[in-house]
Amino acid sequence: MPSPVRVRFAPSPTGPLHVGGLRTALYNYLLAKKNSGSFILRIEDTDTKREVEGSYKYIEEALNWCGLTPDESPSLGGEYGPYKQSERKGIYKEYINELIENGSAYYAFDRAEDLDKHRKNHEKRGKTFIYNAHNRLKLVNSLSLKKNEVEDLLKTTPYVVRFRMPEEKVIGFYDEIRGKIEVSSRELDDKVLFKSDQMPTYHFANVVDDHLMNISHVIRGEEWLPSLPLHVLLYKSFGWSPPSFAHIPLILKPSGKGKLSKRDGKKFGFPVFPLKWENGEEEYVGFKEFGILPEVLINYMALLGWSKRDNKEVYLIDELIESFDIDSVGKSGVKFDFEKLIWLNTQHIQKLSSEDIIKRLSELGEENGLAVSKDAIDLIKPRLDRLGDIEIEYGYLFGQQEVETGLKHKLMNDDSLSFLRKYKTALEKSFGNAEELKALLNECSTIGFGKSMGAMRLCLVGKLAGPDLFELMVFLGKDEVLKRVGSILV
Ligand code: GLU
């Protein structure tokens, strides 16, 4: 392991943090913490056109909510700042000049419409236009033009800086997850490194910053693997040694093909962002508001692509830090499984004390106006699979609920009503503990134990679900139970 371990999460502020980004951040965080290293948040905002207001704040809040607080970031600062690429323009200028001087990069003056024409002409002939060694001398750039022409154009025309991709070269590199990879430079183009707006492109800024910030490991999504040959060559052109790389597999839709997108969340009915996101017309509920605990989201994200041989599934962050290793990350895409996330949420909730659950409900604003007591949580905890919508899911704890339509006829039948009358009269006289209430129900039951329980459940809960009926009766107390049964009998 190179020392010190310094990893970075480098999102572009183009919207809220998606689960894919969150998992990338998590794997970086785990590797850093396992090796007493540093986890850095760098904002890659060189593409100003794609920037979405509020993204940076959202990313930071989401990471903090999940407990993945960076050691260095635009807000926290650090030895290697600034951590926003838009604040590092001067640095990139200096480094691009170095590549131009050593012949690894060159100025290009081609107009967009001319490049378009070349593309179309190639297409007509069934070919793909690639700006590289095969045709760069026929195009308008500092390799094809005379020195004085270049000097004139630099003063008068917008230009870009392109990487001079070697003509025939096998580029070999190593990915921690995929092993050794070789790519021929024949298929690669002279990528733009510096744009006409004097901003670096992602590739250039990313490599320069990873080097200057002393990044030891780059862990990022698989979608960046095709960029790796260029990045490796950029390191070579500067004479720098590259960090180690790991490209993690995509998170796929729960069913069907392709990457999980924000639209899938709406389609399948689950969140895809950690926190609520509102932007003009767009509005998304986050995992937080849905009632998923942050430690569960982290536990689940860790399992999406990574697993230990012992098949353990419920982890707290410290256990993840201890167990995580990049070698156990799989190569193939993993389907997002919302049921499993809910299952994990239930597992983690069972480990919390009722007091802790109440605290978290109040942080979520869920107990607003509801009489959420320790007794109430003790009663429903075994059934609690998420903290959101407590009023919708467990409203019967706080007040009488309408009997679900379709179940009414069960109550309306004469036999059930006469049982309820009998039980109510008995309860008025003696309202004991759960066991006594059960024995009393048995005594009064004229319709069989199951049906009697069902009728009582409908009075108290409004549906044929809920916690142990007799414990619920104890929790509600004599007056409330009699009131609820009475209101059905009138
Ligand atoms: N800015 C890139 C992104 O948003 C970072 C990719 C990388 O980690 O190199 O995904």
Image (tube, rainbow, N blue to C red):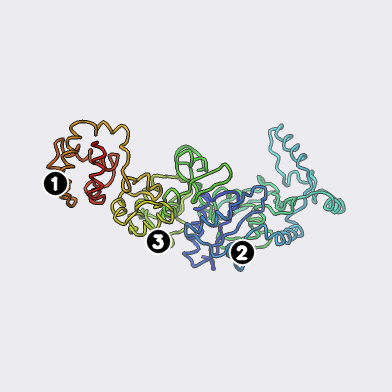
For marks 3 and 1, the one nearer the N-term is 3
Circle 2: is it few (<14), some (14-19), or many (20+) Cα within 10 Å? some
Q: What SS does tag 3 mark?
A: helix
Q: Amino acid at mark 3?
A: Glu
Q: What SS does tag 2 mark?
A: loop
Percent position of residue 457, x then y: 25, 41
The residue that appears at 42% across and 45% down in the rendered structure is 337
Percent position of residue 89, x then y: 70, 59
The residue beneath circle 1 is 439
Q: What SS does tag 1 mark?
A: helix
Q: Closer to us: mark 2 or mark 1?
A: 1
Instruction: Assign the C terminus to one quadrant of the image.
Output: top left
Percent position of residue 345, x then y: 38, 51
Find the distance from the CA under tag 2 to the CA under tag 3. Answer: 28 Å
Q: Amino acid at mark 2?
A: Met
Closer to the camera, 317 or 284? 284
The residue beneath circle 3 is 319
Find the distance from the CA under tag 3 to the CA under tag 1. Answer: 47 Å
Closer to the camera, 301 or 287? 287
Closer to the camera, 278 or 486? 486
The residue beneath circle 2 is 213
Circle 1: is it few (<14), some (14-19), or many (20+) Cα within 10 Å? few
In the figure, 306 relative to 80: above or below?
Answer: above
Horizontal side of residue 249 vs 117, given as left or right = left
In the figure, 366 relative to 87: above or below?
Answer: above
Q: Is mark 3 within 8 Å of ligand 1?
A: no
Tally of marks = 3
Horizontal side of residue 145 vs 320, given as left or right = right
Instruction: Return the residue found at the far front.
Output: 490
Q: Are marks 2 and 1 in contact (CB under 8 Å)?
A: no
Q: Amino acid at mark 1?
A: Ala
